[in-house]
């Protein structure tokens, strides 16, 4: 009988440990900041354009330390501006915590009727963003954002592939985005 109680105690202790661990995960032990809305007149930290006045994907980056003691993320009018700024900031010694981009898999986007140079709609609510590490991009398509050719991010790989099939460009992951890719898209 004593062995039986010992076995039950071990099971209860183990179950309690699992429950406490699961509860800690649910309570948000993660300190990653959440995206914000970009519809309040914010200007792009890369080029200075007012974000809400332009079409296309937008971005925001939270850094460990900001040189200007700002609160909240740096914000951008395009995927291109987001990555250009981040590459420069990393070269200057800043460490990004998280980069958020518009997730076109999660929004009802539209394209303008211009067949020569269609633009994709902007989406600026916090729920419209996703962490870039889970994104797949259509790069170099015929669809433009605020700065012309842009990286069109999708949270679903199949959505990115379908978009690239319909509008041209290459499907790339966030790890494949570098200065050379941005330069190639601009030319």
Image (spheres, rainbow, N blue to C red):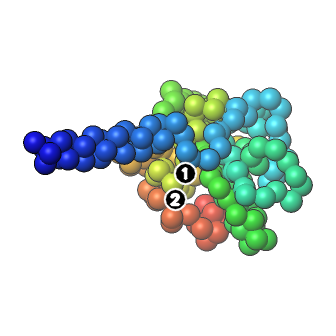
Q: Is residue 29 visible?
A: yes
SS for dot 1: helix
SS for dot 2: helix
Name the quarter where the N terminus is drawn: top left
Nearest the viewer among 51 and 11 is: 11
Is there a contact, CB below 8 Å, between mark 1 and mark 2?
A: yes
132 up-or-down from 42: above or below: below
Name the quarter where the C terminus is drawn: bottom right
186 up-or-down from 31: above or below: below
Nearest the viewer among 116 and 185 is: 185
Residue 32 percent location from the top left of the image: 61, 47
Nearest the viewer among 120 and 15 is: 15
Nearest the viewer among 70 and 77 is: 70
Taking the spot 65% from the left edge, 44% from the top edge, the residue there is 33
Residue 40 percent location from the top left of the image: 80, 29
Q: Is residue 126 left or right of residue 18?
A: right
Identify the residue position indicated by label 2 in the image: 174
Q: Residue furthest top?
A: 108
Q: Is residue 11 left or right of residue 132?
A: left
Q: Is residue 141 visible?
A: no
Residue 84 percent location from the top left of the image: 71, 61
Identify the residue position indicated by label 1 in the image: 132
């Amino acid at each position: 009988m004593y062995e039986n109680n010992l076995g039950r105690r071990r099971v209860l202790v183990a179950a309690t440990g699992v429950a406490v661990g699961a509860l800690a995960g649910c309570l948000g032990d993660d300190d990653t900041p959440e995206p914000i809305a970009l519809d309040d007149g914010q200007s792009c930290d890369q080029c200075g354009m007012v974000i809400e006045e332009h079409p296309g994907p937008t971005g925001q980056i939270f850094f460990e330390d900001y040189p200007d003691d700002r609160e909240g993320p740096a914000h951008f009018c395009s995927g291109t501006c987001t990555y250009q700024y981040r590459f420069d900031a990393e070269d200057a010694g800043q460490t990004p915590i998280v980069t958020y981009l518009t997730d076109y898999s999660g929004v009802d986007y539209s394209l303008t009727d211009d067949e020569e140079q269609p633009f994709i709609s902007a989406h600026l609510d916090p729920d419209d963003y996703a962490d870039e590490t889970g994104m797949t991009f259509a790069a170099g398509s015929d669809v433009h954002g605020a700065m012309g050719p842009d990286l069109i991010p999708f949270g679903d790989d199949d959505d990115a592939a379908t978009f690239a099939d319909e509008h041209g460009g290459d499907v790339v992951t966030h790890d494949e985005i570098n200065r050379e890719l941005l330069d190639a898209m601009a030319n």
